[in-house]
């Protein structure tokens, strides 16, 4: 059985038909930019966070990162710490805002950078940390938030892969991913926990003055008919907002589906020789299910032969990418280099059928036996 790595829930006939009718209403309204659907979506998104948080929708997750760093008022050359093992957009945003990226290695047993790794990289020039709950695992963020508060460093949460995730403290208190930083950024790229039909993003913050400025900056710096500062063109289209407004009402169901599939993988793939499964933590959003294998390339090829589509995240890491090496001194970050060489993401998406899940499990079990 062929199993795609991802199939958008918007491809489901009933949902696609329903959205077609809503799109027709928007098209007939003539209101395509900064309209009522966008405002409703921003309200619905902000309601998923603690009281006082506001949401500002933008054109992409990358735009959200650039705007977030711009809003912090950092100076050229200020250092921003970020994981070496994440999507390149974090690095791009730091460079494009004239700041200095400082890439941080992962722990020896995990992809997700924690407070210990960031703390060791802080210098007198450090002004911000970008925390990334990679693949939907936000367990490390509370300690990072405490570190930032203690050291008076700004915290940006890049929750592109973690909308709907929670971090649980020792006392059992759950904290929303995106509710721990000075400002948080989201991506609604199609494969995310809440995916659009293309690129889209948002910012979240409890600081009203930052969100007021973000609304102006996304629209060429315009306030009350005047362009108060040089801004950006990063306005989410009304059709995209319409889709996401419907999607946010379905997000909890989609998260439950992701968790159910991940649970089957964790149970059925446990104890396979040479396979390291992701940590099973409460509150995980399971945007991606990424295992590790020293025989990753052979495993990927064998799964492809059996019709199972997989992905690799993020190999090579940022510090080994040409765009980094053209500007900065080469680094040796052994943990993330090892993790990246071994990473393999299995199919996991809302609407994945039981037979598809069983096919993936059976194929991984068989492929593991062949590649050892």
Image (cartoon, helix red, strand yellow):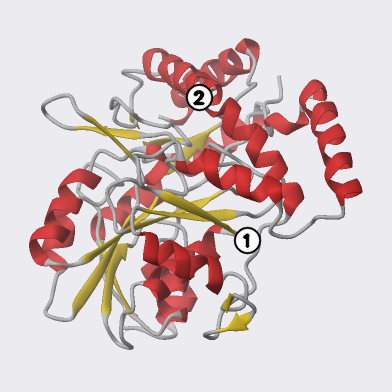
Residue tagged by mark 1?
A: 59
Q: In this view, does 193 lie to the left or right of 211?
A: right
Give residue 252's mark: 2
- Other-residue count near label 1 (Cα within 10 Å), few / some / many at <14 / 14–19 / ≥20: many
User: Which is nearer the eye, 193 or 286?
Assistant: 193
Secondary structure under the numbered disc 2 in the rendered image: helix
- Against 148, is 161 above or below? above
Measured from the top left, where is residue 118 in percent x and y?
Answer: 18, 60
Measured from the top left, where is residue 2 in percent x and y?
Answer: 71, 25
x 54%, y 73%: residue: 217
Secondary structure under the numbered disc 1 in the rendered image: loop
Question: Which sits earlier in the primary sequence, circle 2 or circle 1?
Answer: 1
x 54%, y 20%: residue: 253
- Against 147, is 80 above or below? below
x 32%, y 45%: residue: 179
Q: Is residue 57 left or right of residue 124?
A: right
Q: Quadrant of residue 353?
A: top right
Q: Is residue 29 left or right of residue 184?
A: right
């Amino acid at each position: 059985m062929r199993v795609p790595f991802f199939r958008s829930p918007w491809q489901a006939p009933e949902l696609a038909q329903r959205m077609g009718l809503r799109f027709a209403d928007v098209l007939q309204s003539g209101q395509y930019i900064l309209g009522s659907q966008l405002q409703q979506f921003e309200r619905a998104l902000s309601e998923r966070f603690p009281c006082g948080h506001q949401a500002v929708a933008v054109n992409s997750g990358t735009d959200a990162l650039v705007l977030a760093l711009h809003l912090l008022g950092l100076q050229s050359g200020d250092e921003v710490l970020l994981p070496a093992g994440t999507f390149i957009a974090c690095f791009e945003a730091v460079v494009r805002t004239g700041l200095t990226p400082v890439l941080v290695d992962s722990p020896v047993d995990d992809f997700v950078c924690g407070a210990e790794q960031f703390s060791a990289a802080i210098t007198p020039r450090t002004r911000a940390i970008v925390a990334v709950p990679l693949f939907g695992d936000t367990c490390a963020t509370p300690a990072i938030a405490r570190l930032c508060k203690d050291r008076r460093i700004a915290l940006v949460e890049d929750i592109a892969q973690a909308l709907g995730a929670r971090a649980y403290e020792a006392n059992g208190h759950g904290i929303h991913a995106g509710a721990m930083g000075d400002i948080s950024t989201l991506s609604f790229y199609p494969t995310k926990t809440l995916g659009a039909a293309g690129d889209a993003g948002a910012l979240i913050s409890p600081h009203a003055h930052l969100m007021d400025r973000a609304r102006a900056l996304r629209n060429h710096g315009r306030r009350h008919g005047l362009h108060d500062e040089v801004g950006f063109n990063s306005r989410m289209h009304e059709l995209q907002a319409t889709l996401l407004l419907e999607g946010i009402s379905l997000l909890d169901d989609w998260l439950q589906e992701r968790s159910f599939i991940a649970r089957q993988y964790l149970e059925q793939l446990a104890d396979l020789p040479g396979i390291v499964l992701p940590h099973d933590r409460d509150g995980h959003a399971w945007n991606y299910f990424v295992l590790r294998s020293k025989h990753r390339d052979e495993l990927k090829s064998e799964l492809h032969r059996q019709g199972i589509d997989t992905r690799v995240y993020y190999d090579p890491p940022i510090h080994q990418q040409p765009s980094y090496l053209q500007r900065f001194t080469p680094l040796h970050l052994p943990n993330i280099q090892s993790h990246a060489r071994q990473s393999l993401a299995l199919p996991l998406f809302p609407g994945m059928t039981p037979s598809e899940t069983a096919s993936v499990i059976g194929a991984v079990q068989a492929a593991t036996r062949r590649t050892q």
